[in-house]
Amino acid sequence: MSPHADGAAANYLLAGLPGPDRERLSKRAEPVTLPFGEILAEPSQPLDFVYFPTEGFLSLITTIEGQPSLELGLIGSEGMLGASLILGIARSPTQVVVQGAGSALRLGADTFHGELAQAPVLEDVVKRYLFVLMGQLAQTAACAYFHRVEARLARWLLMTADRARSDTFPITHEFLAYMLGVRRAGITEAASALQRRGLIRYHRGSLTILDRHSLMATACACYAADRDLYTRTIG
């Protein structure tokens, strides 16, 4: 197997493709490094590339004038950026920022369209993933409205750990507030409560999940709902 094919196996969507399809796509893809903070897409701007993360993760962020930004979703090695291309829409509805540095396989939009035409299984997988992403965005919108900050924070930390593939990752209170669309004081209070209960440890910009089971019990039901939707739809 080629090094590119090994990279494809690190992305869950690509790993599920038939061998010949995965190998062909891998050869046409470009391995890229995703540095923290890089902006991969802007609202309503053309999507020239699609990305299949193999390490690290991306944030889907929306803003409303005069209000804090809000993270709507995360994309890690379970998904892809650019699924809307299957609808013939080559624009992003949100800003997409690298939140966890890592790597990805990147294809030009035209190349991706060519792969869709050659690989019916890829087309089906992308359609299913787009459905999952729509469900997760809807879940996040409801979560931000109905659930308290501590439960939302627990959910976000679990989602991040899943995509970082580690229980320790760099983060700041300012960035958490930005992601959850709340003031820093609210994040500080929620994070301090989780730390006092021994669920997490936060020190100098690094956060570690100490008790994943209890953190899952603290998180709102949206975390389990997201995972269940993905499993039922994609497997």
Image: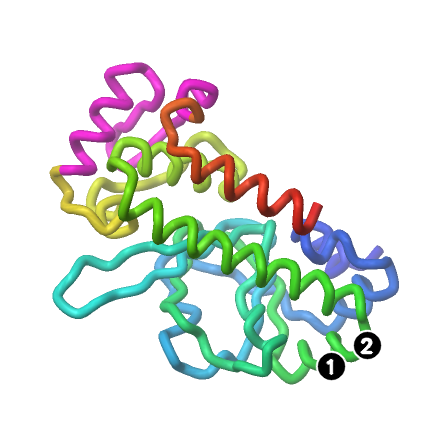
Q: Nearer the viewer, residue 130 or 104?
A: 130
| Residue 200 drawn above or below residue 230 | above
| Residue 84 drawn above or below residue 114 | above
How is the rendered protein coloured? rainbow
Q: Looking at the image, which residue is at 38% across and 62% down? A: 97
Q: Position of residue 207 (x, y in %)?
A: 34, 31
Q: Start and end of the magenta stretch?
A: 186-215
User: Which quadrant would the N terminus be assigned to in this image?
Assistant: bottom right
SS at badge 2: helix
Residue that extends furthest to the right in the rendered view of this protein: 20
Say what amino acid the circle numbered 2 marks: Gln
Badge 2 crowding class, 10 Å Cα cut-off, few under 14, some 14 to 19, many 20 or more, is few
Q: Looking at the image, which residue is at 54% across and 38% down? A: 165
Badge 1 crowding class, 10 Å Cα cut-off, few under 14, some 14 to 19, many 20 or more, is few
Say what amino acid the circle numbered 1 marks: Gly
Q: Quadrant of residue 130?
A: bottom right
Q: Which mark is residue 114?
A: 1
Q: Position of residue 3 (x, y in %)?
A: 75, 57
Q: Nearer the viewer, residue 219 or 60?
A: 219
Q: Which mark is residue 118?
A: 2
User: Which quadrant would the C terminus be assigned to in this image?
Assistant: top right
Q: Position of residue 89 (x, y in %)?
A: 53, 81
Q: Looking at the image, which residue is at 43% across and 39% down? A: 222
SS at badge 1: helix
Q: Looking at the image, which residue is at 52% across and 81% down? A: 90
| Residue 4 drawn above or below residue 76 | below
- Spatial CA distance of label 2 from label 1 is 6 Å
Q: Are marks 2 and 1 in contact (CB under 8 Å)?
A: yes
Q: Position of residue 52 (x, y in %)?
A: 60, 61
